[in-house]
Amino acid sequence: MSNKNEINILIPNDPLPLGFGMSKNWPINTKVNFIKTEYINYKPEPIKLKNIDILIGTDFTLEMSKYANRLKAIFIPAAGYERINPDALPNGTIVANAYHHEAPISEWVMMVATALDHNLIKSHLTFANGSWCQWPARLGPYSELYNKTFGIIGLGNIGMRVAKLALAYDMKVIATGRTQRNSKNNQPEIEYHYGKKGIDEVMTRSDFVLISTPLNKMTQDLINERELKSMKKTAYIINVARGHIINEESLYYALKNRTIAGAAIDTWYIYPEGKKDEPRPSKFPFWELDNLIMTPHHSGATIGTMKRRYATVAENIDRFVTKKPILNVIENISKN
């Protein structure tokens, strides 16, 4: 066991080795002690937190806090931090996350937008089964992204990247966020609104609506029956943020009743534990709908994303050891 002068870092027995993206960034001149343990449902056994200085993980609970006698930092190798209980954090604990997923997520967004607009999934399935029912000579012409309006709720790193791609497709872009224009979102090509009025502008005028805002108390059920009914009947909604930002029941019935044309959903309401395939991702049977593209929260899970995130975690370990400012500190929950 390490002595009290060493910095103890708890890391998971992950199928992707941490050395994958971090080996060139480990602190060289300072003694650190990496302690590997099994994480069950993204969490280590609480007692494993004893004498740990840095936790690498996505979860922190009240039960874990009982043993976190030395914890000073939690470095999340992901963007979301909704599973960190701020009330459980010991005083003096810094929480920092890692992004670097905006490139693959924006690729996924434009891919599904094109697939929805061109009815690609149905075209493939029917044609593979021998039917020419989607042939334009029988069905008529398809739609196109050109000159359509792409709406974005949450103009952060993902939203900005998607906006750039949509503009490259010669689409019009309107966006909304919590604040007025700043140096980041002050782009002349983007029509920007903020607050509740901004959400209404995006929902009513867009042909595609992207949800890319963090989940918190203010954004849970941000998109409800009212907002979905305000959309064009020909419009699509795309969610790469968190499932609960869109009200579950309202979304299901908006799709089932064709209140909107369709959706692409990558983030869900229920997740399995361990390697089980149950439960399904919602209490409503979304999988029975034919106007939905659904994927298992994988839009940003690329090799490149993992490399970049682990490099950021490694740099933060180095900064912690050398007492430099930590990157990506989540100020609203940190107890530093």
Image (spheres, helix red, strand yellow):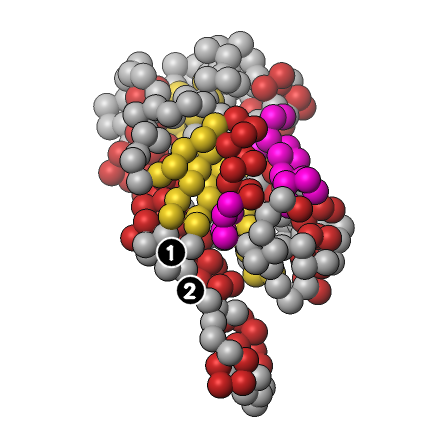
Of residues 160 and 147, the one drawn nearer to the viewer in this rendering: 147
Q: Let me know if residue 226 is in the magenta part.
A: yes
The residue where tag 2 is placed is: 144
Numbered badge on residue 179: none
* Above or below 281: residue 23: above
Q: Is residue 60 visible?
A: no
Report the residue at 24% width, 38% height from top.
Answer: 24
Task: Say whether residue 159 is left or right of residue 259.
Answer: left
**Res 83 quadrant in image:** top right
The residue where tag 1 is placed is: 147
* Above or below 69: residue 82: below
Task: Say whether residue 322 is left or right of residue 74.
Answer: left
The secondary structure making up most of the magenta span is loop
Q: What segment carries the magenta color?
A: 205-228
Of residues 182 and 10, the one drawn nearer to the viewer in this rendering: 182
What is the crowding at mark 1: few (fewer than 14 residues within 10 Å), some, or many (at least 20)?
few
Report the residue at 51% width, 78% height from top.
Answer: 140
Report the residue at 50% width, 17% height from top.
Answer: 332
Residue 22: give x, y in percent of width and height. Answer: 31, 39
Residue 197: give x, y in percent of width and height. Answer: 54, 30
Tag 2: residue type?
Glu
How far is the residue under mark 2 from the one under mark 1? 8 Å
Residue 134: give x, y in percent of width and height. Answer: 54, 80
* Above or below 134: residue 243: above
Tag 1: residue type?
Asn
